[in-house]
Image: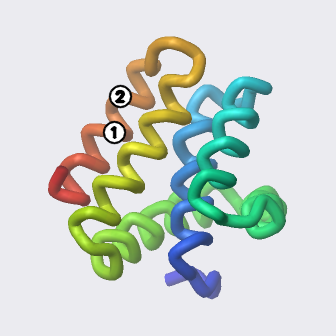
Amino acid sequence: MSSYALTDEMAIDVLIFWIESTDGSISFSEQDAVKRVLTNMNYTLDTYHKTLNQIGAMSTDHVQELVNEAIVYIRSNFSDDGKKLTYSLLDTIANCEGKMSAKQTAKFDRLKKEFGV
């Protein structure tokens, strides 16, 4: 268990990072999609940037542990509609460049199972 205290917004931020960094980098179009999605949800980009800074200081194993915790957090604390909305916003970000990669598709298969969507 990590020492990172998750909130709704931070759990979503962690999963956004997990999805958008699948190929090892974050493109301008992915950054733009994140900005649009978070703005539409009335979430602050400051929290997102703080979350990214904290993730950037973590080891790969710790990041994976945090991703697992974020999935459990959302599964346990979000309503069915909240899980569907989270899945949808992640899908929007993943598809902003046209088509999801095979690795992103595998991540979404996991989210479908975990969130029951």
Kind of residue indicated by mark 2: Thr
Toward the viewer: 64 or 45? 45
Q: Are marks 2 and 1 in contact (CB under 8 Å)?
A: yes
Kind of residue indicated by mark 1: Phe
Q: Identify the residue position indicated by label 1 in the image.
A: 108
Q: Using the numbered discs, state the Cα–Cα distance from disc 2 to disc 1 in whole angstroms.
A: 5 Å
From the viewer's perspective, tell me whether residue 96 is left or right of residue 105: right
Q: Say if 101 sits above or below 94 in the image.
A: above
Toward the viewer: 58 or 18? 18
> Which image quarter: residue 7?
bottom right
Image point 29% across, 54% down: which residue? 84
Q: Residues within 10 Å of mark 1 (few under 14, many from 20)?
A: some
Q: Residues within 10 Å of mark 2 (few under 14, many from 20)?
A: some
**Image coordinates for residue 26, horizontal then vertical, percent:** 73, 32
Q: State the SS at label 1.
A: helix
**Image coordinates for residue 20, horizontal then vertical, percent:** 60, 37
Q: Identify the residue position indicated by label 2 in the image.
A: 105
**Image coordinates for residue 113, horizontal then vertical, percent:** 18, 51
